[in-house]
Image (tube, coloured by chain):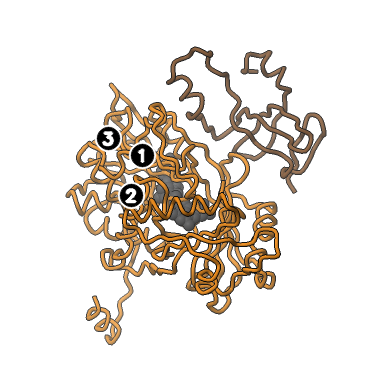
Chain colours: A brown, B orange
Amino acid sequence: MKLIPCPLNGPRPVGEFACLGPAKPMPADDAAPEAWADFAYAEDNPAGPILEWWLHVPSGTMFVAERDTVTDTMIRTLWPADFRAAGGRP
Amino acid sequence: MVFALLRYGLGRRHTPFRVLPPTPATLKPSYDVVVIGGGGHGLATAYYLAKDHGITNVAVLERGWLAGGNTARNTAIIRSNYLTPEGVAFYDESVRLYRRLSNDLGINTMVSERGHLTLAHTDAAMRTMRWRAEVNKSLKVDSEVVGPDEIARLCPELDLSRDKRYPILGALYHAPGSIARHDAVAWGYAMGASQRGVEIHQGTEVQSLEIENGRITGVVTNRGRIACGRVVQAVAGRSSEVARMAGLTLPIRTVPLQACVSEPVKPVLDPIIVSGSLHVYISQSARGEFVMGGATDPYALYSSRSTFEFKEVLMADMLELFPFLGHARVLRQWAGMADMTPDFSPVMGLTPVQNYFIDSGWGTWGFKATPVCGLTMAQTIATGTPHPLIEGFRLDRFSRFAQLGERGAASVGH
Ligand SMILES: Cc1cc2nc3c(=O)[nH]c(=O)nc-3n(C[C@H](O)[C@H](O)[C@H](O)COP(=O)(O)OP(=O)(O)OC[C@H]3O[C@@H](n4cnc5c(N)ncnc54)[C@H](O)[C@@H]3O)c2cc1C
């Protein structure tokens, strides 16, 4: 069974998690519609490391994880506050 | 056809013939059209370029072996009971092309019309079925909502008892729903294309694209550089990676989709059965194997590994529908990389790069579209204007907030 490292609960079965998609900086509130469309739909979709939002569903723990999409391994996890403090680009 | 078959059957001498054309020893310095990706879509595009538009100085470049990508990995369901008028018209043209494909290509594609039942277990699902049936009927597609009695007649093997977690309330019935022999579809197009002069280069990976003044001028491969008139990408699970070489970012996320088959048994299951709420689907192949699949994996990945979690969830729900499957053993398992778009419609046609065309975003639903993709992409490339059937699938629909939502018509919830 695949285990995902939750920063609060330690390694837990993958079925307890929801991947919420790429973590990227949000446009400003008054940004042009194109910028919002880009934020909502366009994806880098890299073959390699990616930053994503993850949720540990039973405990409601949100975190950011860096993951390799080729080797299917977690590189590290970050708390949202640390992710934001780094301007969304740690 | 019938007489030719009879003559062939009664004949005594059968010389073996080669279905797949050999890879030419070298690439030419230049081609009018370079097709990146030798799956069903790329091969069909090359075929119609040659057949309908007389463009034969064409190279199909395939990094692996012919049609070894998702064309070889899909569960071969063909149907047109979609949700948007654009989707229905497009897929229905493909269903029509599939009906005569064996004759057109001179190879047995084994298209088998089984009927397709999408089961509904909730009131919300019933409402979506009614919506789809009305859209389908208004576009002359054979599609209707049926109740449990009719389901029992069409598929007596289904467990229709009410005393379970998700009793079956009704279904969307689509009589033209079919399955086919996916390899033969690709081989047929490869054969037809190469007979008309198209070169098919296996083991040839596109590694970068040279761009000058908004045009692709060269295609760099592991077997050398070639100059090109026009270039089209049809690379399914690698759409984002290849588009990046042309400087494009796509609304696509690559997620594995897994499937498996059981050991073969005698024919018992005629229609194709799908349950959107339970996230499973099943059909029985001509070989007798139950072909089973479910939802995409829970996160993005460039890998075709199989997982235990997939089978555990799939089987739990499959046994709700067909308890007798508890006796069947799994024979093979595999996965393919599905390029998912936010609205579950493809991304096709022109790009901001003048001579670069795209056929992508085929997610979990592109095998059924193989013939119509070839037909429409060939015309789009030959004329430089999008074929009317694919106008709605344009790349810039996302920045114009003009999506074509087909999520409700995906075979299984994702
Ligand atoms: C498990 C599974 C079940 C499915 N079930 C169904 C179904 O029931 N019905 C349905 O309609 N659809 C289904 N699909 C979707 C369907 O398989 C695909 O949408 C369709 O096969 C895509 O065809 P293609 O020719 O575009 O892609 P492919 O057959 O994947 O061909 C693309 C080719 O491009 C090549 N390539 C990639 N990068 C490069 C490069 N840089 N240079 C050269 N070549 C390159 C690849 O090697 C590959 O052979 C399923 C998919 C999966 C994974």
Looking at the rendered structure, whether the residues under marks 2 and 1 are on a common chain is answered as: yes
Task: Tell me if B143 is positioned left or right of A55 in this view.
Answer: left
- Amino acid type at circle 1 is Phe
Residue that mark 1 sits on: B393
Work out whether residue B70 can be spotted. Answer: no
Q: Is residue B157 above or below residue B129?
A: below
- Circle 1 packing at 10 Å, graded few (<14), some (14-19), many (20+), is many
Q: Quadrant of residue B331?
A: bottom right
Residue at 51%, 29% (x, y): give it.
A44
Q: Which residue is mark 2?
A: B90
Q: Report the number of numbered marks.
A: 3
Residue B145 is left or right of residue B277, and the answer is left
Where disc 2 sits, the SS reads helix
Would you say residue B57 is visible in this rendering? yes
Chain of the residue where label 1 is placed in the rendered structure: B
Pointer 2 with pointer 1, Cβ within 8 A: yes
Residue marked by disc 3:
B227
Which residue is rendered at x = 66% and y = 63% of the image? B320
